[in-house]
Image: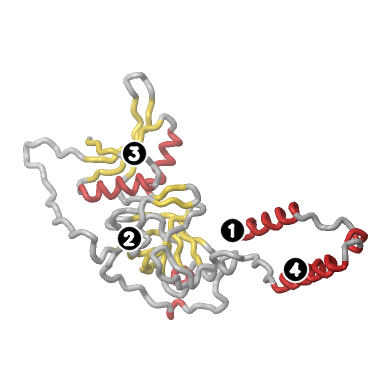
């Protein structure tokens, strides 16, 4: 921010050294003073003519509005992304972080991640610039920006409008405007068939090649013996709302975060109030329960708790 400082200095200089008010005052100056004044005037004019004009797009990016590349891309020529073992560092994974006054949390692992929502794409404006983890963004490769997935990670992305699927590598943060859940590179949007539309309804599913911590052994499912009481089912309760519309809005958001069932139960309290409980389940795997808790919290839906039926 140099320009305001320079402007402020010029104004101070003019205030302390007021210029002559008219031509008559200039002529009345003594000859030596006229010579000094003329030299100084020529120097200032020369400096002004040699100073470059400020760029209207001064800043990190050379263009103000994003756009597609000028050459057409053949989807068949765009390389497929093959998931590989991940050597993850803290680059791009600082958590929590804040953008435009809003705080975001990075998930500790991508295992079990699933979400449906709107995808957009980004291209030439960001091409050649660094991503959140220091890599260089290439709009001709299939990559993605996500608000909460660890970087890097791999996603299977399916366009729900045409059922095309591809794999992308997440190496950037975003999008931070609107209701979009992911920004795909221009090449990825071409492969999914929505580059000319701008957005698409998509399904995201994490692909885990290796985890930061070893996977726990699968837990056997306990079955009730004959004569024993039925096994109680576990649910995550996200909230209880007096307005049915509020419960329906939360349930709709939850349905985009998990494949598990989401239900609304209407109950009456001892005080005679009617509430609408929003629950997800049934759930049995502790790892899935913890992951879903983190996902719900990251979606700003509060802190769910486990209940049994």
Kindly report which numbered mark, 2 or 1, lies closer to the viewer in this rendering: 1
59 sits to left or right of 284: right
| Of marks 1 and 4, the one in the foreground | 4
**Residue 238 bears which disc, if any?**
3
Is residue 154 toward the left or the right of residue 76 in the image?
left
- Separation of disc 4 and disc 2 at Cα? 51 Å
Mark 2 or mark 1, which has the lower sequence index?
A: 1
Q: Is residue 94 above or below residue 155?
A: above
In the rendered structure, are the residues bearing label 4 and label 2 in contact, judged by CB atoms less than 8 Å apart?
no
Q: Residue at x 46, y 75 (%)?
A: 140
The image shows residue 53 at horizontal and vertical percentages of 69, 69
Task: In the rendered structure, find residue 1 and report the number of the disc placed on it.
Answer: 1
Disc 2 element:
loop
Q: CA distance from mark 2 to mark 3?
A: 31 Å
Q: Answer with mark 3 or mark 4, whichever residue precedes in sequence.
A: 4
The alpha-carbon separation of the residues under discs 2 and 1 comes to 30 Å
Q: Position of residue 254 (x, y in %)?
A: 37, 46
Say what secondary structure mark 1 lies in. Answer: loop
Give x and y (percent) for residue 80: 37, 75
SS at badge 3: strand
Q: Can you tell which of label 3 and label 4 is closer to the viewer?
A: 4
Please name which of the two marks, 4 or 2, marks the residue nearer to the observer.
4
For residue 279, what is the image quadrant?
Answer: top left
Which badge, 1 or 3, is on the more N-terminal residue?
A: 1
To which quarter of the image does residue 14 belong? bottom right
Side of 67 relative to 80 (left or right):
right
Residue located beneath label 4 in the image: 44
Pinpoint residue 175: horizontal percent, then vertical percent.
47, 57
What residue is disc 2 on? 90
């Amino acid at each position: 921010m140099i320009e305001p400082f320079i402007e402020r200095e010029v104004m101070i200089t003019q205030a302390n050294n007021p210029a002559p008010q008219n031509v008559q005052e200039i002529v009345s100056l003594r000859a030596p003073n006229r010579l000094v004044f003329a030299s100084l005037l020529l120097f200032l004019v020369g400096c002004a003519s040699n100073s470059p004009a400020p760029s209207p797009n001064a800043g990190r990016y050379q263009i103000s509005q994003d756009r597609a590349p000028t050459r057409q891309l053949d989807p068949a020529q765009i390389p497929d992304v093959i998931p590989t073992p991940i050597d993850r560092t803290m680059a791009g994974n600082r958590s929590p972080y804040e953008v435009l006054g809003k705080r975001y949390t990075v998930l500790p692992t991508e295992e079990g991640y699933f979400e449906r929502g709107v995808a957009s794409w980004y291209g030439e404006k960001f091409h050649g610039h660094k991503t959140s983890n220091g890599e260089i963004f290439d709009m001709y490769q299939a990559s993605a920006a996500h608000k909460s997935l660890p970087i890097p990670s791999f996603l299977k992305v399916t366009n729900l409008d045409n059922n095309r699927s591809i794999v992308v590598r997440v190496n950037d943060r975003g999008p931070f405007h609107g209701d979009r859940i992911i920004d795909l590179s221009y090449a990825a949007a071409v492969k999914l068939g929505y580059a000319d539309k701008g957005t698409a309804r998509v399904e995201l599913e994490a692909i885990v090649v290796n985890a930061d911590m070893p996977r726990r052994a699968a837990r056997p499912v306990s079955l009730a013996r004959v004569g024993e009481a039925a096994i109680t089912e576990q649910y995550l309760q996200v909230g209880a709302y007096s307005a049915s519309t509020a419960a329906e809005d939360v349930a709709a958001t939850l349905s985009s975060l998990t494949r598990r069932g989401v239900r609304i139960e209407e109950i009456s309290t001892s005080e005679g109030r009617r509430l609408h409980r929003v629950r997800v389940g049934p759930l049995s795997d502790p790892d899935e329960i913890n992951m879903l808790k983190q996902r719900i919290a990251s979606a700003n839906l509060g802190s769910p708790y486990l209940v049994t039926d």
